Amino acid sequence: MKYYVVSDVHGFYSEMEKALCDKGFFNDTEPHKLIICGDLLDRGKEAVKVQDFALELLHKGDLIFIRGNHEDLMVDMLNDFEKYKNEIAWGYSHHVSNGTYDSALQLSNIDEYKSIQNSQEFVTKTMLSPYYKELIPASVNYFETSNYIFVHGWIPCLTENIPAWYRRNRHYESNQDWRNASNKDWDMARWFNGMELAELHSIVESGKQIVCGHWHTSFGHSKLEQKCSEFGDDADFSPYYSKNIIAIDACTAHSGIVNCIVIEDEI
């Protein structure tokens, strides 16, 4: 089977469409599927287009959707909107800075004022969107073929009991039973920097390459390969390849591109 793989589209449909066109996705007459390694929405202004495109592929059986941390953020925001509402209204909620709230505005077709004044209608309409109602429930923690594992951040591993995003002096150990990890462990793993775990902590899967998103590939090219700056004019957002990892998050909001790789493998 041929797999076209993208990640962290973040609501940028035009950039994703260009990447898929460049790789021949739309003209491919042989059986193929699209793998999206999480973070379908948030930050871009084409949330509905991205949603509808993914939904069409899902209904055809041609989509494998890996759950990302931004899918978790959307579920969290909608399930507890009253708690976040005042922070969102003032613009200092993480759901604003991460783009979750803006995506919900696009999906619900409700403006900011009405979303706060009539929050129940806003939440209900967003929950009725195909993204929330069909795509997120269809998402999986990982997808595995003979030679590859597809995830969002990384595979679950054993860590100190501190927040996933707090990386300073963090200790990681391999979890040989990661496939059966708890939902809490998978929630945390979606925030991991796969390049850091693979290259600096040797959290890998023997005999396989793990394909991941979540963390901008310029980190690997800059910090691990010492080739360029991380976000300067010379930053490299192309896929990061190593023995045990392929990282593909192009930080689209910054770079203006979506990476797409093509993999042929059997289940």
Image (cartoon, rainbow, N blue to C red):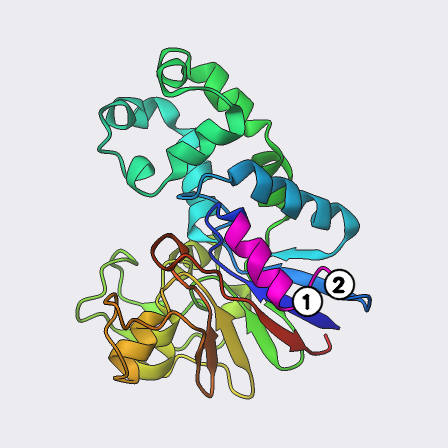
Q: Give above or below for 133 relative to 208.
A: above
Instruction: Verify whether residue 24 appears in magenta.
Output: yes
Return the residue at label 1. Answer: 24
Q: Position of residue 13 (x, y in %)?
A: 54, 48
Name the amino acid, label 1: Gly
Proximity of marks 1 and 2: CB atoms separated by less than 8 Å: yes
Q: Give above or below for 241 relative to 229.
A: below
The CA span between labels 1 and 2 is 5 Å
Is residue 46 something that shows in the picture?
A: yes
Name the amino acid, label 2: Asn
Examine the image and state in which quarter residue 94 appears: top left
Whether residue 1 sits left or right of residue 36 in the image: it is right
Q: Label 2, secondary structure: give it.
A: loop
Return the residue at label 2. Answer: 27
Rendered residue at 23%/67% (across/down): 232
User: Which residue range is magenta in the image?
Assistant: 14-27
Is residue 173 something that shows in the picture?
A: no
Quarter that holds the N terminus = bottom right
Rendered residue at 45%/27% (across/down): 105
Q: Give above or below for 204 relative to 261.
A: below
Magenta span: predominant SS is helix
Badge 2 local density, few (<14 within 10 Å), some, or many (20+)?
Answer: few
Rendered residue at 24%/27% (across/down): 87
Q: Position of residue 91 (x, y in %)?
A: 24, 29
Rendered residue at 39%/28% (across/down): 80
Quarter that holds the C terminus = bottom right
Q: Position of residue 192 (x, y in %)?
A: 36, 64
